[in-house]
Image (tube, rainbow, N blue to C red):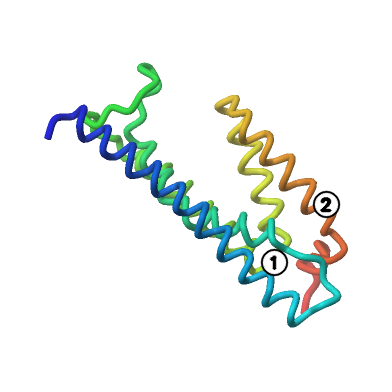
Amino acid sequence: MTNESLETTLLLFFLFYTIASLGASVWLSVKKNEVLLANNPKLAPYKWGYFWGYVSILVAPVFIFYMWFDIELGTYNFSLSPSFDKILVSVLYSFSIAVIGFGIIKRIPLAWIASVVMFLISFAFQLNWIGLGLAAINGYYAWNRRQELNFLSFFKKK
């Protein structure tokens, strides 16, 4: 298999994986939200929270794929041997996104703050406008849920 065909195959795999993850996240968030509202009818729906948590967990492995991204060429180069630093950063970034997603599903307020910070960092270093948009959406959602999620209760001793 040539480098070009390998690149095309991997790009298609990650494209379909991402689309399938989005579909699975929608389905899982609707089901989880139904259970939440059945147990606690006074709570507002938490669909975006569950959706974002599941997306974060399911799509986190895709960020490891960035190890082969060549910044100078602006494309993927699978003949590159990623340095230890690049591998470490990619794995830690993927792991942290998955942990944040788990925290959002468990309704941990600090996870929402971490999610906003991660996307703001993404915007600051890469001028990634999608990151800025997602930070704004997640920040707005968390701000509207501040009473329900009770951000300060996370810091109180139990």
| Residue beneath the point at 31% across and 40% down | 84
Residue type, mark 2 in image: Trp
- 71 with respect to 4 (left or right): right
- Res. 112 image quadrant: bottom right
In the image, farthest residue toward the left: 1
Q: Secondary structure at mark 1?
A: loop
Q: Along the polypeptide, which appears first: circle 1 or circle 2?
A: 1
Q: Which residue is mark 1?
A: 107
User: In the image as oriented, which residue stretches furthest toward the top?
Assistant: 72
**Are the residues at dot 1 and dot 2 in contact (C-beta closer than 8 Å)?**
no
Label 1 sits on what residue type?
A: Arg
- Alpha carbons under labels 1 and 2: distance apart: 13 Å
Quadrant of the drawing holding the C terminus: bottom right
Q: Residue at x 69, y 66 (%)?
A: 107
At x 73% / y 43%, what residue is drawn?
137
Q: In the figure, 140 relative to 35: above or below?
A: above
Label for residue 85? none
Q: Residue at x 60, y 58 (%)?
A: 53
Q: Position of residue 95 (x, y in %)?
A: 47, 54
Measuring from the top left, give residue 155's x and y in whole percent: 77, 66
Q: Quadrant of residue 124?
A: top right
Is disc 1 surrounded by few (<14), some (14 to 19) or many (20+) residues within 10 Å?
A: some
Up the image or down, 125 lies above or below 20; here it is above
Crowding at dot 2, Cα within 10 Å, few <14 / some 14-19 / many 20+, comes out as: some
